[in-house]
């Protein structure tokens, strides 16, 4: 069965391609390599013994999207990762984010509604909840006003899919709301490849550990949390990748309850920034150089998932601990800096 993975050379996309191929799916990857490298294909091939089909297409080019679906009429499902994800950049360049993240979504959905049956998985984010009123966060928690154009594209993206599903019974979709993905594949063949200075905590920690950055700035020590630093739900990227395959199978096998569903994908456990640093120090045996600085604008105090719906309805559960995920991130950092 042929599945399209957009953004399949990116961090979460590449790990998902591996899991799909391991489960016997035939995968076609579309990526424009704007924030990824073609070399990732080698890693995927090494792990799975099979190279996915690859097409370098910019999904903003509507004609190319149409042409692609004409050439691959047997595609039965799409996992749509391709999107821009830098919060700060989205504030500077909102139109770029709306075009990249929403224009492309519309073009793909336009192709899928033409089919007799199609399955669609969307990369959403826990950012849609903003600072939720209650922890852990359930899927029915209210959607808060977006803090950035990036966050807004996830909210609007979900609405576009919801509205389309309402009038398209042949389209089945699931939005997965990711918490904080981290780590690298256990084979050490693929992992996170941030361009420039990492914005996210874990790659900044491992780059500091390896000596590429001098010091980690911990954004805020005065949050109302047990140790004063902000709390997030760090999910191992392979666990997250597996959630996509399980969600896709649910749709392909018609086990979904409605034709648009939403699931949180997290561990259910909150970890503070200091706890993440301690995890790094445990698994690497190194002391991390860090200092406390002011809070980062737009950051929330705490976000961790209630995973009951994903566990019970989707039949998915995270398996790896923070230390295991951190160890894989550290192994990967050491490999790519050699
Ligand atoms: C961020 C985005 C979120 C997006 C997610 C994608 C913001 C405000 N939010 O989430 O919308 O969906 O990335 O991966 O950018 N931290 C430090 N020092 C650092 C980096 C981070 O202390 O150098 C802290 C942050 O303040 C936060 C935690 O580490 O408390 C995690 O930060 P990060 O990895 O950037 O993820 P989020 O902010 O949760």
Image: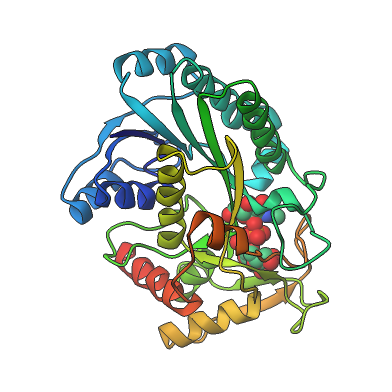
Q: Residue at 42%, 13% (x, y): give it.
A: 66
Q: Residue at 42%, 51% (x, y): give it.
A: 246
Give the image location of residue 102, x and y in percent: 61, 28
333 in relation to 103, above or below: below
Which quarter of the figure is the N terminus placed in? top left
Give the image location of residue 327, x and y in percent: 40, 76
**Residue 289 horizontal side relative to residue 212, left or right:** right
Give the image location of residue 103, x and y in percent: 59, 23
Viewer-side residue, 257 vs 68? 257
Which quarter of the figure is the C terminus placed in? bottom left
Instruction: Tell me the quadrant of ligand 1.
Output: bottom right
276 in relation to 101, above or below: below
Instruction: Identify the residue at the far left of this view.
Output: 49
Is residue 25 among what the camera can see? yes
Q: Residue at 67%, 78% (x, y): give it.
A: 291
**Residue 9 horizontal side relative to residue 144, left or right:** left
Viewer-side residue, 206 vs 147? 147
**Residue 30 horizontal side relative to residue 251, left or right:** left
């Amino acid at each position: 069965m042929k599945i399209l993975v957009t953004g399949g050379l990116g961090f979460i996309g590449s790990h998902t391609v591996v899991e799909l191929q391991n489960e016997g799916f035939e995968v076609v990857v579309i990526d424009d390599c704007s924030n990824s490298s073609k070399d990732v294909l080698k890693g995927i091939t090494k792990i799975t013994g099979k190279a996915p089909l690859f097409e370098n297409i910019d999904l903003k080019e509507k004609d190319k999207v149409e042409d692609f679906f004409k050439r691959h009429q047997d595609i039965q499902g799409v996992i749509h990762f391709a999107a821009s994800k830098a919060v700060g950049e989205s504030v500077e360049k909102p139109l770029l984010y709306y075009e990249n993240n929403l224009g492309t979504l519309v073009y793909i959905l336009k192709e899928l509604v033409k089919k007799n049956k199609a399955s669609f998985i969307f990369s959403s984010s826990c950012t849609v909840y903003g600072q939720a009123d209650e922890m852990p966060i359930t899927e029915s928690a209210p959607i808060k006003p977006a803090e950035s154009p990036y966050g807004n594209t996830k909210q609007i993206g979900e609405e576009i899919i919801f509205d389309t599903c309402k009038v398209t019974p042949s389209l089945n979709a699931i939005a997965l709301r990711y918490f904080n993905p981290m780590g690298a594949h256990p084979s050490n063949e693929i992992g996170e490849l941030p361009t420039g200075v990492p914005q996210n905590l874990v790659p900044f920690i491992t780059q500091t550990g390896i000596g590429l950055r001098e010091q980690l700035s911990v954004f805020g020590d005065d949050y109302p949390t047990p140790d004063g630093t902000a709390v997030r739900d760090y999910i191992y990227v392979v666990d997250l990748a597996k959630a996509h395959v399980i969600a896709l199978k649910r749709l392909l096998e018609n086990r979904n309850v409605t034709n648009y569903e939403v699931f949180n994908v997290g561990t259910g456990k909150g970890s503070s920034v200091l706890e993440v640093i301690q995890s790094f120090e445990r698994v690497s045996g190194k002391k991390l150089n860090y200092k406390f600085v002011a809070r980062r604008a737009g950051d929330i105090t705490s976000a961790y998932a209630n995973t009951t719906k994903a566990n019970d309805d989707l039949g998915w559960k995270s398996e790896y601990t923070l230390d295991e995920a951190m160890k894989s991130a550290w192994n990967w950092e050491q490999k790519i800096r050699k």
